[in-house]
Amino acid sequence: MRTIGFRVDVAEHIGTGHLQRCLTLAREFRKISISSIFFVREYDKELLSLITISDFIYHVIGYSSLENISEDHSYWLGVSQEQDAQEFIYAVSEQPIDMIIIDHYSLDSVWEDMVKDTVSLPVAVIDDLENRKHTCDLLIDQNYWPNPNSRYDGLVSSHCLRLLGPKYALLRDEFISLREPKMQKSSNKLETVLVNFGGVGNLRVWKSFLPALVKCHKFNFHVITGKLSSEDFHYCENIVKQSKHIFLEEKTDQMSYLMKSSDFALGACGSTVWERFCLGLNSALIDVADNQKDLVSYLHERNLIDYLGSLDNITVNSISKYLTDLSMNSLKYQKRRKEIMQLVDGMGADRVAKNIMLIHSNKYNERVLGTI
């Protein structure tokens, strides 16, 4: 195998998490001299720079306007699955690949069947919704669910290899090296809370959280807003400009190190959940989208996170009360830290890459034997 093709998108309505976990896998393949190319739709060229700054290349298969994108993720492409599949097939005819990895809530067996009928390649799918059929050889769902053994029954074939659970969380290499015990902090130094709700900012979130942080002088806060318009970021800056205990920035390339050096986190229920768990960073989460509700509820039920509510019902007062009552050195959080670190060991990307190599090898042998 020489080249893997990733079909993934990044945009304001999609977020950056899907792309980031694909980039993590691509880095894993790079270690063994396998190239990666990202096949994308262009919604926002600025966000596509996340691929090039990671030293990978992308191929734009088509363009979609953000103006008429539905909130229903099955319509996030902005075009039909059939059109997207045709554009992808044309792209790979010019840019040959040996395997396809798909990470996209808008794509399912409709797209996969069209592509597999034309380009006979192994297909791996990264998903976590369990809400549609897939035609694939391997499926990865890194999330923590109560029914792992039966998950995706009837949605994939019996021959599909399923890699399910946080054991397969796709985390960058530095998370393994940063798992060493935390240094003891000076008793007279304020504890630090890392605050981030994803790579794409949402002003509704910050209108609730920033005024609450301003009122809370128990902790220092390091806030990463995610990508915002210049007007919205300036709005956030104005809220905190008199607050010495709040440091605010739009983006960072030091997220893993900030997690390591922080004492607690406020965030959303996205892929960063597993990054925090790997480093033993306790957190209080909200859900910012419907597809996060089930997971955040189960994590709360298992006493692995604190749950602040959904974006629609959190208030400045509810956040302020939570922070006033928060005692992050309690026995509850000490015990929880051990549990979450046991759940995610940081080796998921290595495990997934090895299984993808195995799937490709098996499919290659089937094709060769079939010609004898």
Image: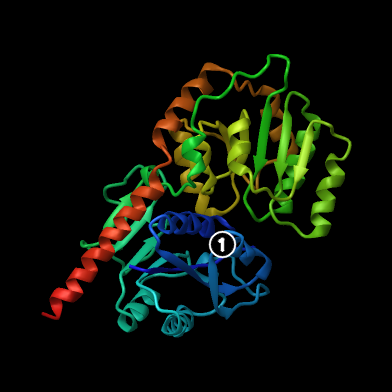
Rendered residue at 76%/34% (across/down): 213
Foreground residue, 1 or 263? 1
| Disc 1 target residue | 55
Foreground residue, 367 or 306? 367
Residue 144 quadrant: top left
Q: Quadrant of the N terminus?
A: bottom left
On the question of residue 198 being in view, the answer is: yes
Image position, residue 167 (x, y; %): 36, 43
How is colour applied across the structure in the image?
rainbow
On the question of residue 156 being in view, the answer is: no
For this orientation, the residue located farthest to the left is 372
* 332 lies above or below 299: above
Image position, residue 95 (x, y; %): 45, 80
Residue 306 quadrant: top right
Q: Quadrant of the C terminus?
A: bottom left
Disc 1 residue type? Asp
Please state the total of marks drawn on the protein image.
1
For this orientation, the residue located farthest to the front is 33
Residue 109 placement, left or right of 254: left
Rendered residue at 44%/40% (across/down): 298
Crowd class of label 1 (few under 14; some 14 to 19; many from 20; radius 10 Å)? few
For this orientation, the residue located farthest to the top is 187
Determine whether the residue tagged by mark 1 lies in a helix, strand or loop. loop
Residue 315 placement, left or right of 353: right
Image position, residue 294 (x, y; %): 47, 47
Rendered residue at 70%/50% (across/down): 251
Foreground residue, 129 or 3? 3
Residue 207 placement, left or right of 291: right
